[in-house]
Amino acid sequence: MSKIFSFVRVNNNNEVYTKEQKKGLETYINKNNFSIYQAIEVQINTPDDEKNILDFLKNCQSSSTLLVYDLHVFGRTIETILEIVKFLLSNKIRIVVIKQNLDLVDDKDML
């Protein structure tokens, strides 16, 4: 069975968004009876901090699943979001995006 990771982008400048992510993930996890292997929380307050996201996501192993509340947790620009999504999918990491109702399994999925 693959390991399931959850990912939250913590922003001290927008605590409402951080709480929204955590609540959405918690609801989804409980509804689907998932067992989380590791909860990843990365503090991002400036655009420069976004460069560190990939370092944290490298903890996810191939054939694992990454749960996120929203695609925006990966970055502020479409380019950054797509770069991270492509990296994860090319490493055989499934991405479940709750808010956008996406289940991306490999890099052939359309985003």
Image: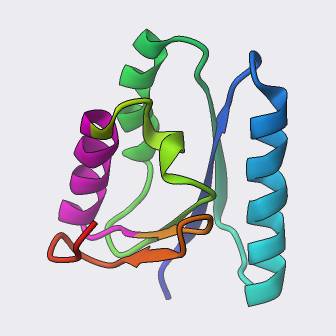
The image's colouring method is rainbow
64 or 10: nearer the viewer: 10
Residue 56 visible to the viewer: yes
How many numbered discs, if any? 0
Where the C terminus falls, by quadrant?
A: bottom left
Give the residue displayed 30% in from the left and 57% down from the top. Answer: 88
Magenta stretch encompasses residue 89: yes
* Residue 97 included in the magenta stretch of the image: no
Image location of residue 4, percent across then percent down:
57, 71
Q: Decide if residue 92 is on the left or right side of residue 94.
A: left
Q: Quadrant of residue 93?
A: bottom left
In the image: residue 55, left or right of residue 89: right
The stretch of residues the image draws in magenta is 79-94
User: Left or right: where does residue 67 sit relative to residue 77?
Assistant: right
Measured along the vertical axis of the image, is residue 42 above or below residue 46? below
Image location of residue 15, percent across then percent down: 82, 28
Q: Is residue 75 above or below residue 81?
A: above
Tell me residue 73's x, y (percent): 54, 42
Q: Quadrant of residue 5?
A: bottom right
Q: Position of residue 109 (x, y in %)?
A: 23, 76
Instruction: Name which residue lies at 76% across and 24% down.
Output: 14
**Visible residue check, residue 33:** no
Report the predominant secondary structure element of the magenta stretch: helix
Residue at figure coordinates x 31%, y 39% from the top left? 78
Q: Give the quadrant of residue 50.
A: top left
Q: Is residue 83 above or below residue 102?
A: above
Specify whether 35 is left or right of 101. Answer: right
